[in-house]
Image (tube, rainbow, N blue to C red):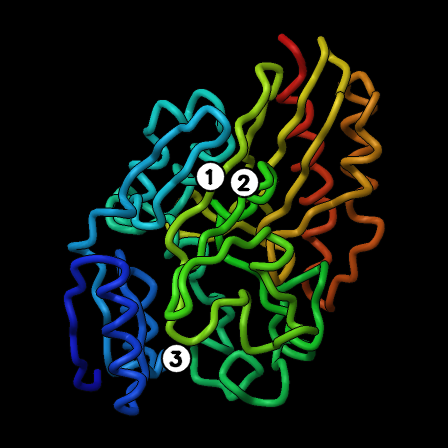
């Protein structure tokens, strides 16, 4: 692995200032919280940074605080801290479950919320040195190649899938993403934060040079809100979702008043299925309704040659997730 310069930041402003100076000196910069994905990318050569801004000593974004109107979660919270926090478990169950589903205990002990949300795709072409869209090239090798794990929604010109489990759960709760950079702080909805390949095939989010994700703000939920995150994998651990479903429902008894359904593992960004959300409103949760919701979700899917197995997986995952939130 190439020689790297490591800078230990003391605060977020300190990290941003250090990054700006490094960029001005002609360097390429990466921020590192837990560093679990970044280290692999540096070894593989898919991240070309030669200056690493370490955030391990930064304490001001390691908190989870409720204001009553919302819950603010710092970007450097570890996934285990997120999964085990009483505020998250009690009101935002899907977020806690999603965080608990990531990797292994060792990864969750060091991996951070911001790192999980902004990690790069695990497409084997991108990770193995192919000059694809993600690496600045002009084609997606998965279109006519090995695409069993690739997108069935939102693909083109790149067909990667977003690897985060936590991001779909946050989107389902209408979280707002806080970004810090040389021009100060800004807040973005999920629609503005995540970027489809048709907008920018090289990126999955709208972070600009020198910016980093420093936290999320999740609006308070009503007492009748229930949620879950259900994940289908091709093995028991150490892997990303073939299909993940973050489901948030407000219900009156067993009748759905409002619903949010966001998918993982099937699209280049966390994929909201608006048609299913609209369908569920006013319905009584039951087997027939849950089954129809699952089938409706995949009507607009566009599978590639080797990933059509994700259609029944997605339908069944949504059916199971909806049924699991029935009253009683």
Residue ID for mark 1? 98
Is 220 on the left-hand or right-hand side of 181? right
Of marks 2 and 3, the one in the foreground: 2
Q: Position of residue 158 (x, y in %)?
A: 64, 74
Q: How far apart are marks 2 and 3 (CA)?
A: 27 Å
Task: Give the answer, above or below, for where 99 lies relative to 134.
Answer: above
Which residue: 67% across, 16% down?
A: 326
Residue 58 can be seen, yes or no: yes
- Say whether marks 1 and 2 touch (CB < 8 Å): yes
Find the distance from the CA under tag 1 to the CA under tag 2: 7 Å
Q: Earlier in the sequence, mark 1 or mark 2?
A: 1
Residue for badge 3: 46
Mark number displayed over residue 169: 2
- Which comes before the other along the chain, label 1 or label 3? 3
Q: What element carries label 1?
A: helix
In the picture provided, is 152 more to the left or to the right than 94?
A: right
Label 3 CA crowd tier, 10 Å (few <14, some 14–19, many 20+): some
Residue at 51% x, 53% y is 187
Quadrant in the picture for residue 96: top left
Name the residue rendered at 83%, 21% in the picture.
Answer: 282
Q: Where is residue 19 in the image (x, y as percent from the top left)?
A: 28, 75
Kindly report the distance in space between the C-alpha atoms of the residues bearing marks 1 and 3: 26 Å
- Tell me the SS state at disc 2: helix
> CB atoms at circles 2 and 3 under 8 Å apart?
no
């Amino acid at each position: 692995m190439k020689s790297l310069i490591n800078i230990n930041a003391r605060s977020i402003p300190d990290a941003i200032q250090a990054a700006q100076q490094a960029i001005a000196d002609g360097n390429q910069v990466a921020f590192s919280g837990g560093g679990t994905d970044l280290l692999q990318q540096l070894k593989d050569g898919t991240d070309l940074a030669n200056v690493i801004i370490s955030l391990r000593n930064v304490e001001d974004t390691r908190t989870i605080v409720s204001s009553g109107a919302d819950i603010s979660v710092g970007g450097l919270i570890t996934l285990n801290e997120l999964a085990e926090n009483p505020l998250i478990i009690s009101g935002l169950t899907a977020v806690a479950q999603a965080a608990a589903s990531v990797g292994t205990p060792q990864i969750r002990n060091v991996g951070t919320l911001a790192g999980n949300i902004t990690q790069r795709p695990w497409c084997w072409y991108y990770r193995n040195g192919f000059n694809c869209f993600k690496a600045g090239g002009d084609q997606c090798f998965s279109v006519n190649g090995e695409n069993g794990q690739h997108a069935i929604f939102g693909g083109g010109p790149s067909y990667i899938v977003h690897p985060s489990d936590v991001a779909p759960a946050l989107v389902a709760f209408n979280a707002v993403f806080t970004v810090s950079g040389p021009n100060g702080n800004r807040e973005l909805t999920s629609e503005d934060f995540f970027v489809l390949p048709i907008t920018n095939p090289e990126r999955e989010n709208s972070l600009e040079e020198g910016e980093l994700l420093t936290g999320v703000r999740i609006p308070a939920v009503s007492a009748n809100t229930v949620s879950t995150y259900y994940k289908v994998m091709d093995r028991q651990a150490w892997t990303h979702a073939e299909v993940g479903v973050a489901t948030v429902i407000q219900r009156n008894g067993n009748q759905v008043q409002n619903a949010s359904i966001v998918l993982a593992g099937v699209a280049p960004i966390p994929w909201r299925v608006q048609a299913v959300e609209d369908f569920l409103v006013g319905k009584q949760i039951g087997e027939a309704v849950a089954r129809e919701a699952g089938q409706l979700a995949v009507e607009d899917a566009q599978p590639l040659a080797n990933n059509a197995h994700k259609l029944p997986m997605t339908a069944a995952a949504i059916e199971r997730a909806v049924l699991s939130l029935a009253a009683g």
